[in-house]
Amino acid sequence: MKEYWGSLASVLGVLAFCQSLLQVLFPPELRFAALKLFNRIFNVFNSYCYFDITEIDGVNTNELYNAVQLYLSSSVSISGSRLSLTRALNSSAITFGLTNNDTLFDTFNGVNVLWEHIVTQRQAQTFSWRPMPDEKRGFTLRIKKKDKSLILDSYLDYIMEKANDIRRKNEDRLLYTNSRGGSLDSRGHPWESVPFKHPSTFETLAMDPAKKAEIMEDLKDFADGQSFYQKTGRAWKRGYLLYGPPGTGKSSMIAAMANYLGYDIYDLELTEVHNNSELRKLLMKTSSKSIIVIEDIDCSINLSNRKKGTANNSSIGRSYCDPEMRSGPGVGTGDEGGNSITLSGLLNFTDGLWSCCGSERIFVFTTNHVDKLDPALLRSGRMDMHVFMSYCSFPALKILLKNYLGREESDLDEGVLKELGEVIDKAEMTPADISELLIKNRRNKDKAVIELLEALKERAERKSKSGECVREKNLNDVEEEEQEKRALDSPKEGCAFDESCKKDEEDEEKKIK
């Protein structure tokens, strides 16, 4: 045993001597240079390069780290073997993420990259005004050197864009209103918001399927058209006019548009806005990817059609700049812009220079009487797409039966279905009226269909009788007008007859002579 320990001590002594000799022969400066040279040689033959993205950059949070985490969550749920689950505040979705020291492969434009999530314990901290987390987290991106320019120029920007889309979709939609009359809150915002939970979608919207498909395609082209609008030099916005009788689904259409695009809604109440300057400030405080709604524009303020004005009220001259145009409670008179909204201010709001202070926004106007609106509001560039919300049609009726009763077209009797198809257009009932009938009898589905058919027939019969009365009245009016015309023309006809008779008698006398 003593011999073993003696030999071990001899070996350790030799190693210590060799180490001392190496330190003498190779000082620290030389060893550092050799290590640096070795790393360079290794990098020359290594085909990969690495990028570190830490969670905290100095004392600030690294936004790129959060973007990468959100971006990877879109594919991690499919290919990851071990996942971490999180749910952010004001979020309606659960986010997946890589666990500690896990890896994930991704592909961008045909280039394969490797992401690794690195988590290490942080060393003991000294006193700091902002304590750091106990763990040091970050992502390491491994790519091939030949793909370095592509990754740095496009891939990271693509990650930031996708992360913003994911964040917006995960967050609750918000419905804003300017109910305070333009006053600012503690944060300097003129809008109040509540979570937007409206369940309306294009799938449940009672509307002709072909028209719905056209609107959805237009919305998708708008949302994906950033490069097109930049190339053509147009502001990235679009205007919709929804018009038709009350109860035809204009508000449901707006909710379906917001849910389809994932946009917030700004419900602008014009009667709460005092002047054009406040209107511009409200527009400046709206965010991108939003829908700005002005409902019942023909009722909120006086923006009537200038062509229908009379000489007495001289509406033609007052439409653009009359300070008394704005109607509503608490409105006084004054100079232009003092306490009134003008048509000019509203046009600049939707299509002027101030409308370009944001991007990817949709303006939606609704009205029950489109003929009352000034043509300046209706032209392209302000209202690009006019959507007529009509009475319930047969395709829309089938959607309502499916939504409220769960009845497909094949579940209904052919005779009943045929009668519904024949009477629905004649009845001219709105989707809201039909929905109320279905809701009332939703527990008894057969009874609901029968009562709906009876209500449609009764409404169609009333419409037919009222139409006959109108036609009969029109015919009577026409007959009375013709009789009056004949009575007025009868003296002239009698004179002409007497003159012709006298002329004939004179001709006969000449012949006899």
Image: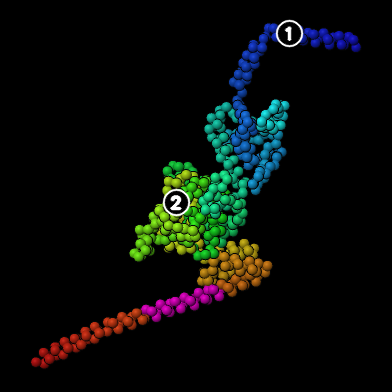
Where does residue 290 sit, x and y in percent of width and height?
53, 49
Write down the region rendered in magenta: 457-478
**Reading the chain from its start, which is encountered first: label 2 or label 1?**
1
Main secondary structure found in the magenta portion: helix
Residue found at x 40% / y 61% = 305
Residue for badge 2: 276
- What is the basis of the colouring in this image? rainbow
Q: Amino acid at mark 2?
A: Asn
Q: Position of residue 22 (x, y in %)?
A: 71, 9
- Residue 135, above or below 389: above
Badge 1 is on which residue? 20
Among the 4 quarters of the image, the one containing residue 113: top right
- Depicted 114 relative to depicted 180: above or below: above
Q: Describe the element under mark 1 as helix, strand or loop.
A: helix
Q: Position of residue 473 (x, y in %)?
A: 42, 79
Say if the magenta span includes residue 239.
Answer: no
Q: Nearer the viewer, residue 65 or 61?
A: 61
Q: Is residue 462 shown in magenta? A: yes
Q: Residue at x 46, y 78 (%)?
A: 468
Please count the marks in the image.
Answer: 2
Residue 206, by quadrant, is bottom right
Circle 2: is it few (<14), some (14-19), or many (20+) Cα within 10 Å?
A: many
Taking depth in this image into account, of 356 and 342 the one nearest to the observer is 342
Please determine whether, in this image, residue 94 is positioned above or below residue 486.
above
Quadrant containing the N terminus in the rendered view: top right
Circle 2: element type = helix
